[in-house]
Amino acid sequence: MSKYEFVPIDVLTKYSGLSEEEAKFWLGELDKKDLLYGQAESYSGYILNYNGYDLLALNALVKGDVLQSLGMPVGMGKEADVLEAMTPQEEKVAVKFHRLGRVSFRDTRRKRNFIGKRRHMSWLYQSRLAAEREYEALMKAYEADISVPRPISQNRHVVVMEFIEGHQLSEVSELDDPEAFLDEILTNVKKAYDAGVIHNDLSEFNLMASREGKIYLIDWPQYISRGDPNAQITLRKDMANILRFFQRKFKVSKNIDDVMTLFL
Ligand SMILES: Nc1ncnc2c1ncn2[C@@H]1O[C@H](COP(=O)(O)OP(=O)(O)O)[C@@H](O)[C@H]1O
Ligand SMILES: [Mg+2]
């Protein structure tokens, strides 16, 4: 799939080791189950779609004893779906499926730019890179004792992590001590910075408050490293988002310039 817009049937046949008849039959079966995306006009070929890619990742995670069963969706976003799941040890975990390039009108311009630079779209590949990056960020952050969901595994475009029982901060209407909460966020952003990572999409939508009142920083695929030339600007933007939210919702004021002195 990295070489073709649609992989020709004769190439698929060759790799499968099946006869042309058999290969065509099974491709037809996969197509019927909506696991492929086919092209029958100029020449015949197929690529995997997200259904097929999901099943390959889930198959690997089940065989690797990471997952046992899937549960309910907990967050269906623009660029990812998050479901609850169970491990063979009956630990409840969160399974995040990255879904870049999912059709949305808002994204058409970005998509066009993207296609312009490449021979063809490879959203599955982009989603795998996003999952790898997110897993990498979670590992770095978790090892540095930052409050993030514990990373458990990653396969293809899927990240498995600790399930946080709680709510997105955007949905929380009351906090016992919003000031202490904000300080807790700042402490974690500072710790992340010291460990070399900057979130780069921090907002009330990417913070979770657990039932025990602990804060978690989630959603890391776009993180940048401390050495990035945009590090300071990015940090400031992240912090400004958080301060704005606490000001608006909890009437807690903090000066952005004061906060930024943490990172000097
Ligand atoms: N580890 C987790 N435990 C519980 N819920 C989660 C977890 N990770 C994500 N979620 C839920 O799924 C939503 C979407 O996840 P997120 O990582 O922010 O992806 P995106 O914003 O790209 O869709 C979150 O806002 C949260 O409600
Ligand atoms: Mg998010």
Image: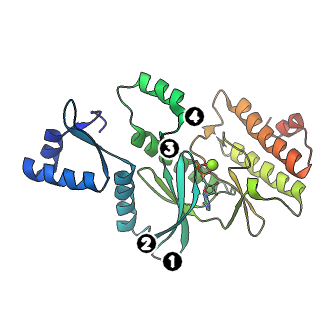
Q: Which of marks 2 and 1 is nearer the N terminus?
A: 2
Q: Do the residues labelled 2 and 1 touch (CB within 8 Å)?
A: yes
Residue density around tag 4, few if under 14, some if 14–19, many if 20 or more, within 10 Å: few
SS for callout 4: helix
SS for callout 1: loop
- Residue 72 seen: yes
Q: Look at 43% across and 22% down and name the residue there.
A: 116
Q: Look at 42% across and 39% down and name the residue there.
A: 123
The image shows residue 264 at horizontal and vertical percentages of: 80, 35
Q: Look at 42% across and 26% down and name the residue there.
A: 115
- Mark 3, residue position: 130
Quadrant of the rendered image holding ligand 1: bottom right
Quadrant in the picture for residue 125: top left
The image shows residue 124 at horizontal and vertical percentages of: 40, 43
Find the distance from the CA under tag 3 to the CA under tag 2: 24 Å
Q: Which of marks 4 and 2 is nearer the N terminus?
A: 2
As rendered, which of 104 and 26 lies closer to the eye?
104
Q: Which residue lies furthest to the top in this view?
A: 116
Up/down of 68 relative to 167, above or below: below
Q: Look at 39% across and 49% down and name the residue there.
A: 50
What is the three-letter code of the residue carrying label 1? Glu
- Residue 172 vs residue 30: left or right? right
- Mark 4, residue position: 106
As rendered, which of 120 and 163 lies closer to the eye?
120
Find the distance from the CA under tag 2 to the CA under tag 1: 8 Å
As rendered, which of 96 and 21 lies closer to the eye?
21
Q: Which mark is residue 68?
A: 2
Residue density around tag 1, few if under 14, some if 14–19, many if 20 or more, within 10 Å: few
Q: Earlier in the sequence, mark 3 or mark 2?
A: 2
- Mark 1, residue position: 90
The image shows residue 135 at horizontal and vertical percentages of: 53, 51
